[in-house]
Amino acid sequence: MHQKVLEKNSGMIFIWPSSKRQCMWMKNTSLPLSVAFISSNGRILEIYDMVPFSEESICSNQRARMAVEVNQGWFAKNNIIVGDKINF
């Protein structure tokens, strides 16, 4: 929230204490972002584009442990899709 710029190839990771249906929103966020919800074993479960300043919750349909937010379109530009696995 309140970020004016997100550098190319940068992002924000959110790690929750447990896996469950997680929700994100864009209140006070002026940047168009994409979010990937990720399982506890690092598998990308879902990817969504989010609308700046929206207070609508974007929720995972599956039990997610993490989320990564990046500039909108970054996942597509980098050929990252649902089912891919991250290394951490």
Image (cartoon, rainbow, N blue to C red):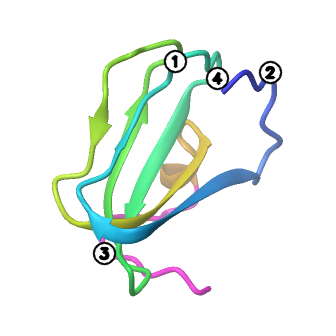
Return the mark for residue 83.
3
Return the mark for residue 31.
4
Residue 64 image position (x, y, % from top left): 32, 65
Residue 59 image position (x, y, % from top left): 26, 42
Residue 32 image position (x, y, % from top left): 57, 25
Give the Cα separation between the discs numbered 4 and 3: 26 Å
Q: Main secondary structure of the magenta part?
A: loop
Q: Which residue is mark 1?
A: 27
Left or right placement of residue 81 versus residue 76 in this view: left
Give the Cα separation between the discs numbered 2 and 3: 31 Å
- Nearest to the eye among marks 4 and 1: give it: 1
Report the front residue among 77 and 75: 75
Residue 42 lies, with reference to residue 1, above or below; the image says: below
Q: Which residue shows up at 52% across the image and 80% down it?
A: 86
- The C terminus is located in which quarter? bottom right
Q: Which residue shows up at 31% across the image and 71% down it?
A: 19
Question: For the residue labelled by badge 4, is the local secondary structure a helix, a strand or a loop?
Answer: loop
**CB-based contact (under 8 Å), mark 4 and mark 2:** yes
Question: For the residue labelled by badge 3, is the local secondary structure a helix, a strand or a loop?
Answer: loop
Disc on the earlier residue, 2 or 3? 2
Residue type beneath disc 4? Leu
Q: Which residue is mark 2?
A: 4
Q: Quadrant of residue 37?
A: bottom left
- Nearest to the eye among marks 4 and 3: give it: 4
